[in-house]
Image: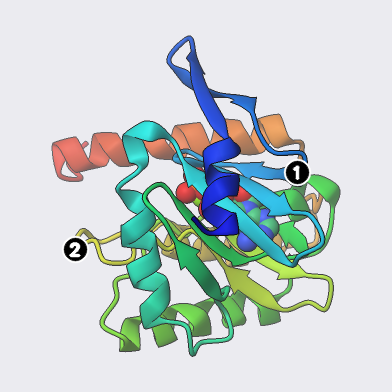
Amino acid sequence: MSLFEKLAQSIVIGNKCNRPLIIGYDDSLTLAGVGRSAFVFKIQHTNKVIKVFFPEHQHLAKEEAEVYKDIQHIDYYPVLYEVGMNYIVIDYIDGYTFFECLTKGIEITEEEIKKVDLALTLARKQGLNPSDIHLRNILITSTKEIILIDVARFRQLKTCNQWLDLKIAFYRFYTKRFFPKKIPAFILNCIAALYKFFHRKNIITGGIS
Ligand SMILES: Nc1ncnc2c1ncn2[C@@H]1O[C@H](COP(=O)(O)OP(=O)(O)O)[C@@H](O)[C@H]1O
Ligand SMILES: [Mg+2]
């Protein structure tokens, strides 16, 4: 059994009010983030994280690893080190997500937006369909490089407009002088919830209001 597999097995995930809850994990791990499908831990004394999927999303480990394998030559994505039944091990990205940048008032520049575009174009050249590109899946490193994570849905066929809509918001609002560059997390979460609500409604009504 590999060291990473042992670490993955040390992570015990329970359930509280229908939400995944961490019950225990190895001392060498530090929680780095939580998403809709996994917990992510930094592995002590390494530049790696282990992403352990919630039991109902275990199948995404293999799916995400397969996508990473297709884009390993592109600098805008982390290196994949190992894949197991319910986990993947990738580079630890020392930086902030776009979401954190907005809540901390760290400015996001047009140059960074263009780097995200390039990262997505390069993934498309590999025959992928980048999806689920939102504020928490884009990181800016301390050296201002852009890294995209959470690529599990890059092989889906459905069109995802999240990045296009974020870009529209960037140019229409964020770049304007009057627009606040620091936004509280609860406001961003409200906007995200409203976006999801109207987007779903649109899918159901086929865009007819
Ligand atoms: N390689 C990484 N380095 C640093 N932080 C990460 C890394 N991967 C994920 N995270 C953090 O964990 C969060 C959840 O990870 P993510 O892969 O997006 O999970 P999910 O698929 O559940 O959305 C991210 O929004 C980010 O804050
Ligand atoms: Mg995510």
Q: CA distance from mark 2 to mark 1?
A: 35 Å
Classify residue 134 as left or right of residue 83. Answer: right
Tell me if I can see residue 171 in this picture.
yes
Question: Which quadrant: the C terminus?
Answer: top left
Tell me if I can see residue 179 in this picture.
no
Classify residue 57 as left or right of residue 11. Answer: left
Q: Crowdedness of circle 1 by 10 Å Cα count: few (<14), some, many (20+)?
A: some
Q: Give the residue pinned by disc 2.
A: 157
Circle 1: residue type: Thr
Q: Secondary structure at mark 2?
A: loop
x, y percent for residue 117? 50, 79
x, y percent for residue 112? 67, 76
x, y percent for residue 119? 50, 81
Ligand 1 neighbours mark 1 (CB distance < 8 Å): no
Above or below for 112 versus 3: below
x, y percent for residue 18? 43, 15
Residue drawn at point x = 59 percent, y = 54 percent: 50
Front residue of 77 and 116: 77
Tell me the number on the disc at residue 55: none
Q: Give the residue pinned by disc 1.
A: 30
Residue drawn at point x = 60 percent, y = 34 percent: 189
